[in-house]
């Protein structure tokens, strides 16, 4: 690689690897300079420059022109220097071209290794730059292998990681299977760019609807939020910016074709499509569908609400293992407490009972005060009557 025209090799690598020509030229210059420094054991001041005309990397040795040489590796006598350049003066820096063929085989091998390393680094940088702005996209890949439960997925130019924690329950893959996943993170590590995929992220659900529903792609229907319990159930809130377009109907599609495609991709995950509204009470009622709601009490300050449902709708509103109400609470972002009509009535009666008892006690206390007052007022009259009787007896005597 150190002899012969390198222009063709550079052009081929640029085409195959997608690396910028400047990056590769810098790598070649660094490689040749590294080999030269190794040959001369870093005792000389060397520079490497790629010659576009000859297609070679030229190595120059720079020495300082002096009257008396102290360091023969870095200095040159004025007389000897003028044999090379007649116009040179003392303290000038003189560059002399070295023969590339003078490098040893070890030096050439070192140059080759540096070139390979530079190309690899450039490839890694290129992959990172390509995928760093694609976070949030859904990509298709091919399963290559398992590593401790994690999937290695081939995306073409790069390999991505689908961690075990990001795989939906009951989803199994074999080598060469195609997989569709959401890019959740792209980061640069010591081993190169690391692309993290997810099959559990709510963004996967949103992206699938975006690709299946033209109204969403065009911005007529907006997805306001989505929550999932992967592999089991999901809820998605939609709103239409066109009064003539039903957002739920647009997402469901003709005979459920659009939503069914999404369900199939998510391996049978149930999806509830809910019309979004800015009124939290109405939104909560819609999010708890298919259960009916009797009434809603809202605490705006605490961002919580108490929802009363008919007795026969309680289990439907709560869902299996609390799934329905849990997803609804996540979707609207409020804390939800669900009660049946009978329980709510019992609590209301229990709360009303102390108030009634208090009224009875107050009435009894008031009655007691009246009786006591009457007794107190009657006592002087009796004493006066006794006194009159006594006086009457005395007068008879």
Image (cartoon, helix red, strand yellow):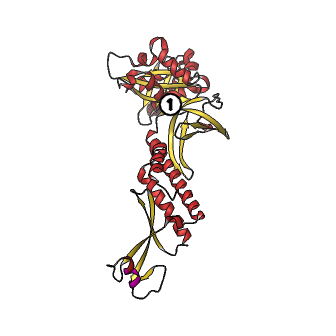
Q: Secondary structure at mark 1?
A: helix
Q: Residue furthest top?
A: 255
Residue in front for this viewpoint, 106 or 293: 106
State the residue at coordinates (41%, 36%).
301
Image coords of residue 3 (percent x, y): 50, 58
What residue does disc 1 label? 204
Magenta segment includes 335: no
Q: Is residue 244 left or right of residue 49?
A: left
Residue in front for this viewpoint, 395 or 294: 294
Q: Is residue 141 left or right of residue 224?
A: right
Image coords of residue 308 (percent x, y): 50, 22
Residue in front for this viewpoint, 144 or 40: 40
State the residue at coordinates (54%, 53%).
116
Image coords of residue 113 (percent x, y): 57, 57
Q: Is residue 396 visible?
A: no
Magenta segment includes 79: yes
State the residue at coordinates (46%, 36%).
136
- The image quarter containing residue 93 is bottom left
Q: Residue furthest bottom?
A: 68
State the residue at coordinates (66%, 30%).
174
Q: Which residues are magenta?
A: 78-82
- What count of labels does the image hold? 1
Image coords of residue 295 (percent x, y): 45, 20
């Amino acid at each position: 690689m150190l002899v012969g025209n390198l222009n063709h090799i550079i052009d081929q690598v640029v085409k195959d690897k997608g690396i910028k020509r400047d990056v590769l030229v810098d790598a070649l210059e660094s490689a040749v300079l590294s080999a030269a420094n190794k040959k001369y054991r870093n005792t000389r001041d060397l520079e490497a420059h790629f010659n576009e005309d000859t297609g070679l990397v030229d190595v120059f040795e720079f020495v300082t022109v002096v009257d008396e040489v102290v360091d023969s590796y870095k200095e040159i006598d004025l007389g000897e220097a003028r044999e090379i350049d007649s116009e040179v003066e003392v303290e000038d820096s003189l560059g002399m071209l070295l023969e590339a063929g003078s490098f040893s085989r070890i030096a050439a091998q070192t140059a080759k290794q540096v070139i390979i390393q530079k190309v690899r680094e450039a490839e890694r940088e290129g992959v990172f730059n390509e995928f760093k702005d694609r976070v949030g996209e859904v990509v298709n890949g091919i399963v290559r292998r398992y590593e401790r439960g994690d999937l290695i997925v081939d995306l073409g130019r790069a390999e991505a990681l689908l961690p075990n924690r990001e795989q939906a329950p009951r989803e199994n893959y074999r080598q060469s299977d195609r997989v569709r996943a959401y890019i959740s993170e792209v980061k640069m590590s010591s081993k190169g760019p690391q692309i993290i995929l997810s099959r559990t992220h709510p963004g996967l659900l949103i992206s699938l609807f975006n690709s299946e529903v033209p109204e969403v792609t065009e911005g007529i229907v907006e997805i306001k939020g989505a929550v999932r319990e992967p592999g089991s159930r999901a809820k998605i809130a939609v709103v239409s910016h066109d009064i003539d377009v039903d957002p739920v109907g647009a997402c469901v599609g003709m005979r459920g074709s659009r939503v069914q495609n999404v369900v199939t991709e998510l391996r049978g995950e149930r999806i509830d499509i809910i019309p979004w509204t800015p009124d939290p009470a109405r939104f909560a009622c819609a999010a708890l569908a298919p259960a009916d709601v009797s009434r809603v009490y809202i605490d705006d300050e605490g961002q919580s609400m108490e929802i009363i449902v008919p007795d026969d709708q309680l289990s439907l509103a709560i869902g299996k293992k609390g799934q329905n109400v849990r997803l609804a609470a996540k979707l609207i972002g409020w804390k939800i407490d669900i009660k049946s009509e009978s329980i709510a009535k019992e609590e209301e009666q229990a709360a009303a009972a102390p108030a009634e008892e208090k009224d009875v006690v107050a009435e009894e206390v008031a009655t007691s005060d009246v009786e006591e007052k009457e007794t107190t007022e009657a006592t002087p009259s009796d004493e006066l009557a006794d006194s009159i009787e006594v006086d009457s007896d005395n007068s008879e005597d």
